[in-house]
Image (tube, rainbow, N blue to C red):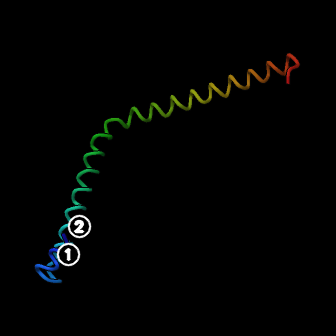
Amino acid sequence: MIQWNYDRYGRERAGLTATVIQAAGVEVAREVLAEAQGAIQPLVPYLDTLRWLLIAVALAGIAVTIHARIDDWKRGRR
C-alpha cells in the first residue's frame, strides 16, 4: 500500500499516508484498551476477594502439610 502511494503520489504524500495510517492504528489501540479497561473495572472487587481466598487456601495447605509432618514425627516415621 505504501509503495503504491509512493509510486502514485511521490515521496511527500506517501510519507503523509504512512503517518495517517499509524495515527489511525494508535487510535484503534486506545479504543480497544479503553473498552477492555471498562470491561475489567467492575471485576476489580471480585479479583481482590479472589486473591485473599487463594492466600487462605495456600495457608491451609501449608497447615495441613505441617500437621502431617508433625504427626509422622510423633509416630516415628521420618
Residue 19: give x, y in percent of width and height.
21, 72
- Percent coordinates x, y for residue 18 in the rendering: 20, 72
Q: Residue at x 67, y 28 (%)?
A: 62
Q: Classify 29 as above or below 57.
A: below
Residue 64 % position (x, y):
68, 22
In this rendering, the answer to whether 31 lies above or below 15 is above
Q: Residue at x 25, y 50 (%)?
A: 32
Q: Residue at x 28, y 40 (%)?
A: 39
Which callout, 2 or 1, points at the residue further toward the start of the chain? 1
In the picture provided, is 33 more to the left or to the right than 68? left
Residue type of the residue flagged with mark 1: Gln
* Quarter location, residue 43: top left
Q: Secondary structure at mark 1?
A: helix
Write the residue at 64% across / 26% down: 61
Q: Is residue 28 left or right of residue 40?
A: left
Residue of label 1: 3
Which disc is residue 35 wearing?
none
Q: Quadrant of residue 24?
A: bottom left
Q: Quadrant of residue 65?
A: top right
Q: Which residue is mark 2?
A: 22
How far is mark 2 from mark 1, CA to CA? Answer: 15 Å
